[in-house]
Amino acid sequence: MRSETRARVEKVARELNYRPNLAARSLASARTSYLGAIVGDVTNPLQAQIARFAAIEAEAQGYPTIVSLDADTDEKAEHALESLLAHRVAGVILIESPYEKPAIAKIAQRIPSVYIGRLLKIVDIDSVTTDHVAGATSVVDHLVAQGCRRILHVGGGASPGAERMRQGYRAAMERHGLNDEISIIEAAYTVDSGAQAGREIFDGVRPVPEAIFVCNDLAAIGVINVAARRGIPVPDRVRVVGYDDVMLAGTETLSLSTVNQPAHELARKGVSAIVHRLKHPETPVSKQLVAPELIVRRSSTSPLS
């Protein structure tokens, strides 16, 4: 092809927003039966589990899945979407990515989508998430039953699910008459962020709380690591509860009390929602809550006598 002709073709392609069908160039007029999955943070055990179960569930329903693992920012999520669109996927499963609501809405307008990890009441997209209000409530109720009053919450900042978790914590504390004990330090869903919150808790001027409810298990591990370095025993001096129930939480060494988010159920409902959307595109969007379960282990209970 002559350079002048190539330049004209490329110019028209850009104007038409043309994307080559990398999966099946010979079937350029047909959309494939593949689904795409965009994962916010594959190093997060819960997200990795959801992605794995979603791929298995989608395959069982006749939709092989192409997974994009590197989408820990909204910009990366957009790049991941472009790659999936080039493969002409039929729909997209968004696993805690992107983060900002306008970015989520933009994707939903371009391709059938389901978001796993947030309720997203005001965004026109199917969503599936754990009932974080109920999860946080169960933690506070448990810690109060253990005799704790000074219960601090290490929140997840702007992370998916964090706001509803804070709502549940506040409401439960108020219901127990502990309004004056409400205390929140913001972090993120990582060990390092939990350790930073731990340093603020244990090295600050405020009294060490009787219990700490942490936004996820990775951050809880960070908090416990700092407590150990400061010679503050868990649970003798401070009780700690995490969230997610990742595999490490149940080990004998850690024995972390936590809230189980049922990854398989979240994945199953998410895949069912996107498949239903593909078959019935005009149906109203669904917002589904999955019930969590408090798992009590050694980190939040009195030591054995």
Image (cartoon, rainbow, N blue to C red):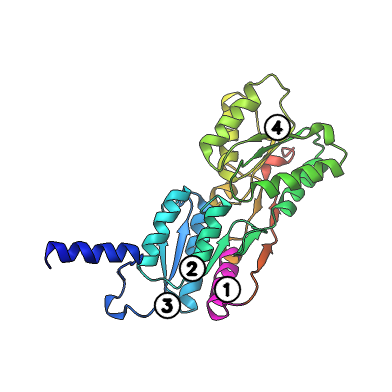
From the image, tell me which residue sits under label 1. Answer: 272
Disc 3 and disc 2: Cα gap in Å?
13 Å
Closer to the observer: label 4 or label 3? 3
Identify residue type, mark 3: Ser
Q: State yes or no: residue 267 in magenta.
A: yes
Q: Residues within 10 Å of mark 1 (few under 14, many from 20)?
A: some
Q: Position of residue 172 (x, y in %)?
A: 81, 45
Closer to the camera in the image, 205 or 18: 18
Identify the secondary structure beneath mark 1: helix
Image position of 73 with respect to 206: above or below: below
Earlier residue among tags 3 and 2: 3
Span of residues in magenta: 266-282
Residue 12: mark: none
| Residue 232, picture quadrant | top right
Label 1 to label 3, Cα distance in Å? Answer: 15 Å
Q: Nearer the viewer, mark 1 or mark 4?
A: 1
Please tell me whether residue 104 belongs to the stretch shown in magenta: no
Q: Looking at the rendering, which quadrant does residue 148 occupy? A: top right
Marks 1 and 2, the one that precedes in the sequence: 2
Which kind of residue does numbered mark 2 sit on? Ile
Q: Amino acid at mark 1?
A: Ser
Q: Is residue 43 visible?
A: no
Q: Return the mark for residue 33.
A: 3
Q: Nearer the viewer, residue 214 or 296?
A: 214
What residue appears at the point 45 percent right and 52 percent down from the top-left corner? Answer: 42
Q: Which mark is residue 238?
A: 4
Q: Residues within 10 Å of mark 4 (few under 14, many from 20)?
A: many
Q: Nearer the viewer, mark 1 or mark 3?
A: 3
Task: Determine which residue is flagged by label 2.
Answer: 111
Q: Which residue is more in the foreground, 3 or 174?
A: 3
